[in-house]
Image: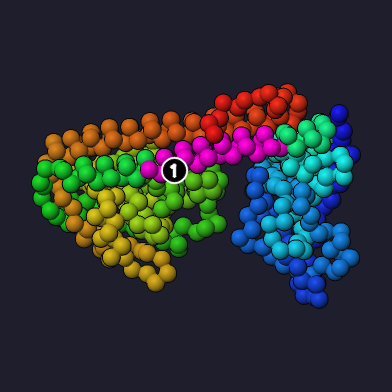
Amino acid sequence: MRLTLGQAAEVRLGRQRAPQYEAGDSIVPYLRSANVTDGALDLTDVKSMNFTPEEQRVFRLAPGDVLVTEGSGSRDTVGTSAVWNADFPDPVCFQNTLLRLRPRLGVTDGRYLAWWARYARSSGQIAAVSSGANILHIGSDGLKRLRITVPSLSDQRRIADFLDDRLARIDRIIAARREQLLLAAHAYDSRREAVFLGAATGRDMQLRRLNCVVQTGPFGSQLHSEEYVDSGWPVVNPTSISRGRLRAVPGMAINGEVRARLQRHILREGDIVFGRRGELGRAGLVTSEEVGWVCGTGSLLVRLKDVRVLSAYVAEVLATSAARHYFRTQSVGSTMDNLNTEILMSVPLRIPSVTEQGRILGVLARVAAEMHATKNDLTESIDLLAEYKSSLITAAVTGELDVTTAGSGVPA
């Protein structure tokens, strides 16, 4: 039969957190939106506050309760839910960043209700009854009016058993694919290092011996934090550098007027931008797509003028494990690794002939292409499995799939 959610479950918003509840005679743990992920609870950081005995009777969690996040900055994540299975010593209450769906006795089963809640979020039904500009909030009245297919309790439990089993299998496959992604990344790094180790002998020299310019990005007095805008000329800081490439980071851009006074920091094709803070060894080559971007405060700019050296080769060498080890041992700073121009200019490099540099870059490009192909295949597999999970949940809780006869095709 078809019921409204209000008929199938008691819908209640949690109690507000306030300074007066920080102390009292009845301090108990409570859950908040940060504790709820898609289909699971994260109980690594559970807060506590005072709930009187009367409040505990109202806001206390019971096994089978479904917790739904009441607000989110994204339509895709508003309404994320998980079922409470008394995973923490009783009593535990909940805050008003969560809504509690409590199954009505004799009408709904908690596990079935939890699967329906995941379907309602992924299908956009919960987002449809949410409102707000920057943060979406679920309207409890609208939520109560959502329609839910409610079969018999025995069928609900059968559906929940089916989904528990099938999705656990799919999740194991997804976990294996993600592990394969990590192994592929490690294999790529190993093959990359092997290319340099097997290269022909070259000249060992410091970066300073090459005809190049090394300079820091603009100091804080030259580029103020309030001058950053959401769209404009991208500024390259360490977080903009990933696996040898540069990317624009939202909110890290400047307008043309600010850029005009930072002429010496404007990037040219072939420049190398090196992160001088945090994770050392991030080097990104400026291609034609990034020309005109600006070297940021947390970066160093390397501009090679030596015809004996290819910029792309130096960028690759600066990201090798040997170079990273050198930077870690030479970095300065008490709380964060930090590099200066002197350290970067002193890094030892092995420079073979231009012909050999080109050969090495060609091998590295092939290795990278193979890695990207493997990564794309695994990522596509994970995405397809995630879509299959969603479709399986939808079919089971809407009655499109008879779980008593269905087979999922998922390995045990």
Q: Please rate how many residues cluster around mark 1, counting C-alpha atoms within 10 Å: few if below 14, some from 14 to 19, many from 20.
A: few
User: Which residue is the site of mark 1?
Assistant: 179
In this orientation, which residue lies closer to the viewer: 294 or 126? 126
Residue visible at 25% across and 55% down in the picture? 323
Q: Let me know if residue 382 appears in the view.
A: yes
Residue 194, percent from left and from top: 22, 44
Residue visible at 41% across and 35% down in the picture? 375
Does the magenta run of residues contain 179?
yes
Give the prevailing secondary structure in the magenta stretch: helix
In this orientation, which residue lies closer to the viewer: 382 or 15? 382
Seen in the picture, residue 41 relative to 6 is either above or below; the reply is below
The three-letter amino acid code for the residue at tag 1 is Glu
Residue 340, percent from left and from top: 31, 63
Please state the extent of the stretch shown in magenta in the rendering. 160-183
Residue visible at 31% across and 45% down in the picture? 189
In this orientation, which residue lies closer to the viewer: 201 or 210? 201
In this orientation, which residue lies closer to the viewer: 163 or 375? 163
Quadrant of the rendered image containing residue 185? top left
Does the magenta run of residues contain 350?
no
Q: How is the image coloured?
A: rainbow
Q: Quadrant of the C terminus?
A: top right
Residue 344, percent from left and from top: 26, 58
Q: Is residue 326 left or right of residue 11?
A: left
Residue visible at 44% across and 43% down in the picture? 179
Helix, strand or loop at disc 1? helix
Residue 244, percent from left and from top: 34, 44
